[in-house]
Amino acid sequence: MSVPPSAERMNASVDQVADSATRAIAGAVPVASRASARWTVDAVEALFALPFTELLHRAQTVHRQHHAPDTVQLSTLLSIKTGGCSEDCGYCPQAARYQTGVENEALLAQDVVVAAARAAKAAGASRFCMGAAWRGPKERDLAPVLDMVRAVKAEGLETCCTLGMLKDGQAQALKDAGLDYYNHNLDTAPEFYGDIVTTRDYRDRLDTLERVREAGINVCCGGIVGMGESRRARAGLIAQLANLDPYPESVPINHLVQVEGTPLHDRLGGEAALAPLEFVRTIAVARLTMPKAMVRLSAGRRELGDAAQALCFLAGANSIFYGDRLLTTGNPDVDADRVLLSALGLATA
Ligand code: SAM
Ligand code: DTB
Ligand code: SF4
């Protein structure tokens, strides 16, 4: 049996990596930060293994060095093109090949999108994220989306799109239309990825992220936990994100929403595959490894409950998806979120 490293030695090595990463970003570029210290999966896993209170203390300390500790940013999602997707992502209710009850719908009209954006702004959101169930936008799809980006931007909201893989030139066209953020997730660690998606590979995702970065759009990139992955795989996902150079401005951490008819629902049987406290640890580790990023509580907040969400804010989460729906699944009601944020004394931005 191998002897585990002593807690002290492990903490020392984690401290070294964390401190050098924090030092490396201090005073560097204002928004995204350079990942000049590479995170090893071992070092990230060592963070996961810290005593819970120590981990949260460290995460909150780093959080306060870079962010207002009492403010949560609100992003609202809208599915502008629902269902009928050609891909086989094992978690996704929008894949045409799974019987989930989600119908293939046409792209929404611009006036419908603008009305939703206005309502989101009136409810307090600062960013509006438009999602499409595409492998990637076809050329004829992109033009109406560019119009939507212009129109939403004109409403005084930050704009975000998640449209799948982008080809050469598409990211630049989105940037020219005024897109602020592009969401494209790595989803999980490279070694677990093939268990979840086969119709596009990890490299495809990294290529799209590079195109987004090169076009000068802020990168929103995260993943999903609770898919039956090991803690090592969670650490592997975080290491991949933290080692992007620069690391993403925005990191959505999704807790799998198990939808009947998807392969992951079949595999996991509708039982949560992750303890809430392990989700909180994931948030804390994201905060420690990507100090300046906005870390967003994304899918799965309803299932998480108020107490675990409060711990997530303590662990460094500072953004949520806000609105009664995500893309096709539910989200906490706006009123319930207002009550929770007010009970926690958190302001919104
Ligand atoms: N089709 C585009 C793509 O896949 O890049 C954009 C939309 S897709 C729904 C955006 C992200 O939502 C996925 O990458 C995944 O991380 C997340 N997601 C989808 N279904 C989910 C589920 N059931 N639970 C948690 N996250 C989910
Ligand atoms: C992200 O990381 N999570 C959001 C957003 N980016 C597009 C999507 C969550 C989708 C959850 C399942 C659904 O509602 O269809
Ligand atoms: Fe399609 Fe995106 Fe769902 Fe994958 S996650 S099936 S690409 S909509």
Image (tube, rainbow, N blue to C red):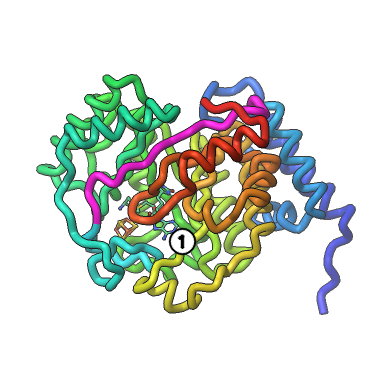
**Residue 7, placed above or below residue 266:** above
Corner quadrant of residue 287: top right
Magenta segment includes 74: yes
Q: Nearer the viewer, residue 300 or 332?
A: 332
Measured from the top left, where is residue 23 in percent x and y?
70, 29
Q: In what element is the residue under mark 1?
A: loop
Q: Residue at x 61, y 65 (%)?
A: 274
Magenta: main secondary structure equals strand
Q: Nearer the viewer, residue 303 or 268?
A: 303
Residue type pointed to by label 1: Val
**Residue 258, placed above or below residue 245:** below
Disc 1 C-beta below 8 A from ligand 1: yes
Q: Residue at x 33, y 45 (%)?
A: 208
Magenta segment includes 238: no
> Does any portion of residue 35 appear in the rendered image?
no
Q: Residue at x 79, y 49 (%)?
A: 13
- Residue where numbered disc 1 is placed: 257
**Residue 222, placed above or below residue 123:** below
Q: Nearer the viewer, residue 105 or 44?
A: 105
Measured from the top left, where is residue 73 in percent x and y?
52, 31
Where is ligand 3, by quadrant?
Answer: bottom left
Q: Nearer the viewer, residue 324 or 126?
A: 324
In the rendered structure, the answer to whether residue 60 lies left or right of residue 237 reads right
Q: Residue at x 45, y 66 (%)?
A: 258
Measured from the top left, where is residue 137 in percent x and y?
20, 47
| Magenta-highlighted residues | 67-82
In the rendered structure, the answer to whether residue 33 lies left or right of residue 143 reads right
Q: Residues within 10 Å of mark 1 (few under 14, many from 20)?
A: many
